[in-house]
Image (cartoon, rainbow, N blue to C red):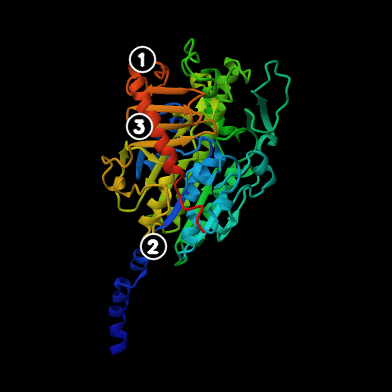
Amino acid sequence: MKSAALFPILLAALLVWPGDAPAADAARPYNVLFIISDDLTATALSCYGNQVCSTPNIDRLAAQSVRFTRAYCQGTYCGPSRASFMSGYYPHATGVLGYISPRKAIGDRAMWAEHFKNNGYYTARVSKLFHMGVPGGIEAGTDGADDPASWTERFNSQGPEWKAPGDGETLEGNPDGKKPVVGGNTFVVVEAEGDDLVHSDGKTAAKASELLRHQGKKQEPFFLGVGFVRPHVPFVAPRPYYERFLPYASMTLPEKVAGDWDDIPAAGINYKTSLNMKMDERRQKKAVGGYYASVAFMDAQVGKVLDALKESGQEENTIVIFTSDHGYHLGEHDFWAKVSLHEESAKVPLLIRVPGKKPAVCDSLVELIDLYPTIAGLCGLEVPARLQGKNIAPLLDDPSLSVRDAAFCVNGRGMLLREDRWAYIQYGEDAKKGIELFDMQQDPEQYDNLADSPEHQEIVAAFAKKMTARLLEVRTNDLDKK
């Protein structure tokens, strides 16, 4: 009788016992979910103001995050950018200005994900985190310039890319319309047959969701890197994602300004332009529509991953980051794709959601290289003093603060220093290949290069000194030490 009477009391006590699951979760270190898109300009996202391309899932994350309006990559093409934020070193420090892994340069120093792995985290990569050729590497399902030491497990997401069945057109170098759909780093639009799982990003979302649900049941914390390859060319997505952007003729192109290139140094003319791609207005508008459809497809996959995180029971214990490796031109200055050092190419979207911290908008200059020290610190890990990025965690509590006087970025031809008011671009370390200077308050679209203006020569001279100092700083590292 006494045992039976005590049972309801014991049951009630067990239901509120401090050692129950909620307390165990609270004691668990933060997990990290790092989501990165490929070749994504912030201006294609509705949370950054786009009124044509709706991205409800990324917007959902933005509403819970600190959204950075002035985040910059350190390299405006895939390999150097990814090598930089994953290693914690600037491209000039590692010498990684091409499509290789930075492992040879940094030796046994831990990469970002590897640092978490060394501290007891399960670390996994799904698809493209370090550089991976698109579309070639995705078609083959290979690892690219990946770093095996960074991961407990890694998964590639093979897909058909430009070979996907559907309605396709090659837009680049095809003025007479006779060229078939082709592979390579080429502007191609394919309105594909089949569902999301036919394609690499659909498979990436499915695998990442599976891992989240599985890891949510385990006690060990996780660092999960999820790399989507869209909207990188080819612009391939299931047909339904194109419907909202049809007819393509309804797409709006950026303003064309007569003589726009007259004050841009030859080294500053982008490698892909409307002129050298032979893209007429019709094809340019279709390129914009194809890009937006690819963004919409990628956004849907982000939504699946976020839903899986919630289902895992770990949403309130997981830091979520969303960004891109660099920006992208969609016809601004008649430039297309990446590589230039103008805003469209150098600036990236960046959302950081930390449990318990209020959503906000932050206008401070930040760099992708800041992610390694910031996220390590938030998770209670030692932050290696050798890292060249800054800890931007204070901005997550007070977004009105500022942590940088300037952001630094390279493209293999030149270097950018982006300050609050000025954008200074120098081609060649001696500036012999040209300079660009833009007043970003008066000329945010960068049409008027002031580098040769007599009244701005003091500013140019001051920036030249700053660039020399910055180059010395980014090269000062411990990589030459044993």
Q: Secondary structure at mark 3?
A: strand
Q: Is residue 253 visible?
A: no
Question: Measured from the top left, where is residue 153 in percent x and y?
Answer: 58, 59
| Mark 1 or 2, closer to the camera | 1
Which residue is disc 2 drawn over?
29
Which badge, 3 or 2, is on the more N-terminal residue?
2
Which badge, 1 or 2, is on the more N-terminal residue?
2
Q: Which mark is residue 419?
A: 3
Out of 45 and 349, give the one closest to the viewer: 349
Q: Amino acid at mark 1?
A: Pro
Answer above or below: position of 404 versus 340: below
Out of 163 and 101, give the one closest to the viewer: 101
Q: Amino acid at mark 2?
A: Pro
Q: Residue at x 42, y 36 (%)?
A: 408
Which residue is disc 1 drawn over?
454
On the image, which quarter does residue 439 sit in? top left
Q: Secondary structure at mark 2?
A: loop
Q: Quote the CA–CA distance across marks 3 and 2.
A: 36 Å
